[in-house]
Image (spheres, rainbow, N blue to C red):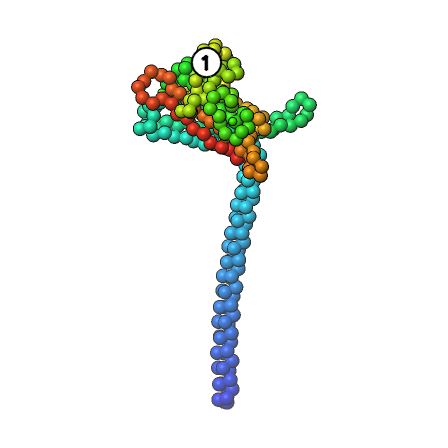
Amino acid sequence: MIPKRIIVVAVCVAVLMVAVGAYGYALYSEISSLKGQISLLNQELEELWEEIDALKQSNSTNNTNSTMNFTFTWGPETQDIVDEIFKIEVSVWFGDNTLPDNTTIKMFYIVVSVYDDDHSKDDYLGLVFDMNHNGVIDLGFEDDPLIIYGDDSTIYELGAVTLLEDGLLIVAEVPREPAHNKCVYNLEKGYVFGTFGYPASDITSQFEDMPAYIPVHICFADRNLNLGVHVVSFQFRIYL
Ligand SMILES: [Ca+2]
Ligand SMILES: [Ca+2]
Ligand SMILES: [Ca+2]
């Protein structure tokens, strides 16, 4: 007959083994779940690095030649150029231009899309930069305003185009000349004016330690014969 004491010890050992087994299993599950969490964290970290790389990339493109797009809109109650919302889109970008002597100059380019719904040879876009570098767009002809008509013609004569207080242009009685592909019109989109390119230094203003900027004045006149308001003008600055 097995003594009672041995039975008690055997039962105790069995209970202990079950307890150790259960503890071991619990530990194993915890480790598995921790492993799972670590792998999730690793995945998140990888995604974060990918995002950081993408941001770095977009930042470096912004600093070089990427296009900046601006949209200006006027509601139906503020203009009669179109029946609904009138829209002008402006795209600007910088680029390097290598001259024949191998020097490189930084260029500023601009395209203006005007969503007018009817073509006229006398519709016009006005574009004024701070040509005399005094930091502002001047009234009169100080900043040599550029005018491009709906029939892709322009005025080259110095002093013949004047910027008025209302933001529009007035032109002396001088003949128009071909602008050479600076204006196209299609029924769906309206006018596309440009591309116009300038050496950035020709139109940039800077005062002491202030950041350098390019002031831009744009106006558009719809000359089709309707009643109401057919002109818009606006100014903005591009900081370098
Ligand atoms: Ca119109
Ligand atoms: Ca028109
Ligand atoms: Ca000026």
Q: Is residue 200 above or below residue 33?
A: above
- Image coordinates of residue 1 in percent, x first then y, are 50, 89
Position of the C terminus, as image quadrant, is top right
- Image coordinates of residue 172 in percent, x first then y, are 45, 13
Residue sitting at x 31%, y 21%: 228
Q: Nearer the viewer, residue 54 or 90?
A: 90
Total marks in image: 1
Left-right relation of 27 to 189: right
- Image coordinates of residue 4 in percent, x first then y, are 48, 89
Q: Nearer the viewer, residue 58 or 104?
A: 104
For the question of whether residue 114 can be seen, the reply is no
Q: Is residue 48 above or below residue 85?
A: below
Which amino acid, by three-letter code, is at mark 1?
Answer: Ala
Residue sitting at x 49%, y 61%: 33
Q: Which residue is mark 1?
A: 172
Q: Is residue 209 above or below residue 215?
A: below
Q: Nearer the viewer, residue 39 or 53?
A: 53
Q: Residue furthest top?
A: 175
User: Crowding at label 1, few (<14), some or many (≥20) Cα neighbours within 10 Å?
Assistant: few
Q: Is mark 1 within 8 Å of ligand 3?
A: no
Residue sitting at x 36%, y 22%: 230
Q: Residue furthest right?
A: 101
Q: Is residue 196 above or below residue 206?
A: above
Residue 96 sits in quarter: top right
Left-right relation of 86 to 111: left
Residue sitting at x 49%, y 20%: 141
For the question of whether residue 163 can be seen, the reply is yes
- Image coordinates of residue 75 in percent, x first then y, are 34, 30
Give the SS element for disc 1: loop
Residue 118 sits in quarter: top left
